Amino acid sequence: MHPANILILTYGTRGDVEPFVALALRLKERGHKATLATAEQFGPWIASFGLDYAPLTNASLDVVHSDDGKTMLEGGSSLLSRVAAGIRLARKSGLINARLCTDAWTAAQKTKPDLILYHPKVIAGPHMAEALSIPAMLAVLQPMIVPTSAFPATGLPRVPIPGYNRATYRLVAMSYGVFRQSVNRFRSEELGLAPVRRARDVLMPPGMSVFEVLHAISPLVVCQPGDWPAHALMTGYWWLPLDPDYKPPRALEEFLKVGKPSVYVGFGSMTTRDPEALGRLVLDAVRLAGVRGVIGSGWAGLAAESEDIIVIGDVPHNWLFPRMAAVVHHGGAGTTAAGFRAGVPSVICPFFGDQPGWAERSLALGVGAPPIPRKRLTPESLAASIATAICDPAIKVQAQHLATDLESEDGTAIAVSEIEKRLQACKRS
């Protein structure tokens, strides 16, 4: 088809960005011009792929490193402390969203897109598309937006009450109401549009008649519900290919050549008020489990000293994870997918949000040992789950089977096909 100009909006941690890099690269291969707009801190990394990039403020990510952000993430504080922290963060959210909207609009004005594809954390996307009279497509990494009676929104508990599952999606939609004031100001002052009335219209404004919702998730991991509308689709994961020229740190290569099986432990973008205590917990757990540990320092700045442990910075998961006996992580959507693709057992220690849902899926699929929520994490509990992960042959076999099946999928190709169908349909109309 005729090359199109596509603006991709995403926001969050690396796990929220990497799948969209993979999609942008595939669109570029098809001859389209894809501009990826996301937090400034990812700009140099995105540019290294030869992709066009537009900056969005880092402000929302900076909140993660604040005291209130750490209180909400770890979940170990008192309920009163968490409520107070949540109120303070909510007060900041409107101003941060306003800045995100302004930055996204600047990107749209510069790129003049034919289509906008947006992550639900960049809620300016559909409003800008409405103002520009172009199509918009929502792309999500968790099934939390499109209602179904098959299961609750990811991260919320399963409760055997009639109507409960669908009600959880209404709860998610209502949560967007906190941004309605800032979105309406953006619509009025910058886009010249009428205000939206309902909380759910913040993410899917009524001025946009039809939405496609692409889920960058494998249907082998989450089966596509039979009651989804035709515009919702599980495409399969959007994998970023491993750079064939990638060279890992020499110290890591040497560490992996000798000794007992190595287990990865890292909590990615999760922060902590006491990184030394969390580092000691991980060190003690690795010792109790009788394994060697590859510790990802992550945003928490984990550190540990032992001849059986090496601490690493950023190393591509698709290089590292297949070399591990098991992977221990927080259960972010991207890290979970990487663990599944690696074909090794997982131990998920969820902190918040959708992470408990991915922990549940790892167990249900038979590819993970019993999860341990962050607030219940101890050296003994973590060591026990690590031991299960590396010693249970059924988990190993099932993890390998899932990885083999995932290799047969091409999620980015399906996503690109859907994008091109939408562009062609709009051109005909």
Image: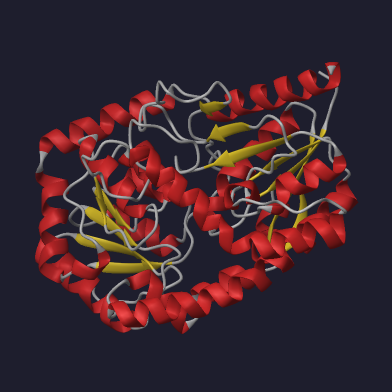
Nearest the viewer among 261 and 20 is 20
Which residue corresponds to the image point at 78% horizontal and 60% vertical from the top-left? Answer: 186
Which x, y percent locates residue 288? 10, 66
Which x, y percent locates residue 198? 61, 50
Query: Residue 209, located in which quarter of the rendered image?
Result: top right
Which scheme is used to colour this image of the protein? Answer: secondary structure
Which residue corresponds to the image point at 47% horizontal and 57% vertical from the top-left? Answer: 315
Which x, y percent locates residue 223? 37, 27
Tally of numbered tags? 0
Which residue corresponds to the image point at 19% horizontal and 37% vertical from the top-left? Answer: 396
Nearest the viewer among 268 and 400 is 268
Q: Is residue 394 left or right of residue 294?
A: left
Which x, y percent locates residue 294? 31, 62
Q: Is residue 229 something that shows in the picture?
A: yes
Which residue corresponds to the image point at 24% horizontal and 61% vertical from the top-left? Answer: 373
- Quadrant holding the N terminus: top right
- Quadrant holding the C terminus: top right
Q: Is residue 105 left or right of residue 329?
A: right
Q: Is residue 153 something that shows in the picture?
A: no
